[in-house]
Image (cartoon, helix red, strand yellow):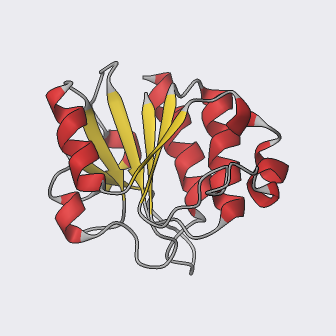
Amino acid sequence: MIAILHNIRSMHNVGSIFRTADASGIKKIYICGITPTPTDRFGKIREQISKVSLGAEKYLPWEYYKSITTLIKRLKKEKYKIIALEQDRKSIPYYKLGFNENKIAIVVGNEIKGIPKNILKLCDKIVEIPMRGRKESLNVSVAFGILVFELIKK
């Protein structure tokens, strides 16, 4: 399983996703768009990410891709199933996902705008976490953790 982080703004969310990815056995993280990378353009470690990830960014492989579209098309050629975690009219509850695949890529997006429609169209499935309270959504790193550990069970 791999993860794709698209246009996530918060370094704390990126760090948290790295930590969860390490804990769950994610093989690689792809960072796309405006998502901050663990190191800046000068190679200096971003302390806000490192503090939350507890150093997971140092040994969990990651790669920056400017274009998520290019990345998804490449991964599809490599036979990955692309799962977007997003609230959408086409989404299904995450626990009803029927995949039993080894090559899965999980896409999570911007904290406010989510994953753009043109990216959702490229995905094999769109899943969401049903909300029972008054709030419409969870923090992106929390939602990522819920989905990843659900997929591990399968």
Is residue 106 positioned above or below 47 on the image?
above
Which residue occupies 26% across, 58% down?
91
Relative to residue 91, is residue 3 depicted above or below?
above
Tell me the quadrant of the picture where the N terminus can be found: top left
Can I make out residue 8 in this image?
yes
Q: Is residue 90 visible?
A: no
The location of residue 61, given as percent across then percent down, is 56, 30
Residue ID at (22%, 48%)? 70
In the rendered structure, the answer to whether residue 132 lies left or right of residue 78 reads right
Residue 84 horizontal/vertical position (percent)? 33, 51
Q: Quadrant of residue 75?
A: top left
Residue at the limit of the structure toward the front, as seen here: 42
* Left or right: 104, with 4 as reference point: left
Q: How many marks?
A: 0
Coordinates of residue 22 in the picture (x, y in percent): 66, 30
Q: Residue at x 57, y 66 (%)?
A: 138
Above or below residue 63? Residue 153 is above
Give the residue at x 18% y 66%: 118
Q: Quadrant of the C terminus?
A: top left
Q: Quadrant of residue 48?
A: bottom right
Residue nearest the viewer, comparing 142 with 14 = 14
Side of 129 relative to 74 (left or right): right
Picture coordinates of residue 98 (x, y %)? 27, 32
Residue placed most toward the observer, 62 or 85: 62
